[in-house]
Amino acid sequence: MEQRVLLVGPPGAGKGTQATFLCQWLEVPAVSTGAIFRAHAAAGDELGKLADSYTSRGELVPDEVTNRMVDARLDEADVQGGFLLDGYPRNVDQVYALDELLGKRGLALDAVVLLEADDDEVVGRLLGRAAEQGRKDDTEEVIRHRIELYHETTQPLIDIYTERGLVVRVNGMGSVEEVAERVRSELATFLEAKGAQS
Ligand code: AP5
């Protein structure tokens, strides 16, 4: 069955890591706004330069740029049978922008997976990644800013999706495999219950 799912959580909660498992299970592609921005930055194109001037400071790329990019991505062939959105929406205005993008295509979300992990754990994970990969926004100062921005700007959207009955909360602490198993079983239970109601 076609599934349209969001993956939300603080920086370093394991969204990208878990997206890989979840996409295999749901048989849908991942659409990660962060990964798209990094690909453009690596290519050195105009969008990449613009995005990099925000992402490297841990700031959000302006909504009109991000919304337009997601709009175009949702027209591509591979996402017509469903998708996993990772990192978008990231603020309340983007929630309403996504509503429009889906609405004009006659689509709706099936679930919002909220991956939770505490601040000390995510800082540790991201500093570990910094040592391995050297991602530009993984300095301690920028990591702390990204976490702050998550609490201020991204967390409020959880209330909106909770009111819509879409949120599946998953504990993101523990090994990658333990979390993957939790995500899968909790999302499966949620989607089954939703299917039974409709
Ligand atoms: P984005 O790429 O979305 O970054 P993020 O939300 O900060 O998330 P991360 O990629 O840092 O972490 P993750 O949760 O995916 O964890 P991961 O699996 O990688 O966005 C980057 C930037 O782009 C934003 O700051 C913003 O500037 C811009 N942007 C993106 N979307 C935007 C939007 N919608 N609007 C405006 N701007 C936007 O794991 C992290 C590390 O932990 C890895 O090393 C991994 O191996 C390790 N790890 C994972 N799981 C575990 C585990 N269970 N145990 C131990 N280690 C683990």
Image (spheres, helix red, strand yellow):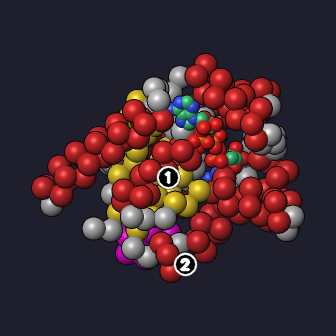
What residue sits 36% from the left and 59% below the top?
26
| Residue at which label 2 appears | 76
Residue 151 bears which disc, if any? none
- x and y percentages locating residue 145 in the rendered image: 73, 30
Question: Is the CB atom of the residue marked by disc 2 within 8 angstroms of ligand 1's nearest atom?
Answer: no
Q: In this view, does 193 lie to the left or right of 143?
A: left
What is the secondary structure assignment of the residue under circle 2?
A: loop
Q: Is residue 60 left or right of residue 190?
A: right
Asked if residue 102 is among those painted magenta in the image, a careful observer would answer: yes
What residue sits 82% from the left and 65% below the top?
43
- Specify which label sits upstream in the sequence, 1 or 2: 1
Specify the amino acid type for callout 2: Glu
In the orientation shown, which residue stands out farthest toward the left?
A: 196
- Mark nearest the camera among 1 and 2 is 1
As drawn, 118 above or below 155: above
Residue 135 visible at all: yes
What is the secondary structure assignment of the residue under circle 1?
A: helix
In the orientation shown, which residue stands out farthest toward the top?
A: 120
Residue 159 visible at all: no
Stretch in magenta: 100-107
Number of numbered discs visible in the structure rendering: 2
CA gap, disc 1 and disc 2: 19 Å
**Quarter holding ligand 1:** top right
Specify the amino acid type for callout 1: Thr
Asked if residue 146 is among those painted magenta in the image, a careful observer would answer: no
| Residue at which label 1 appears | 20
- x and y percentages locating residue 1 in the rendered image: 27, 68
Question: Is the CB atom of the residue marked by disc 1 within 8 angstroms of ligand 1's nearest atom?
Answer: no
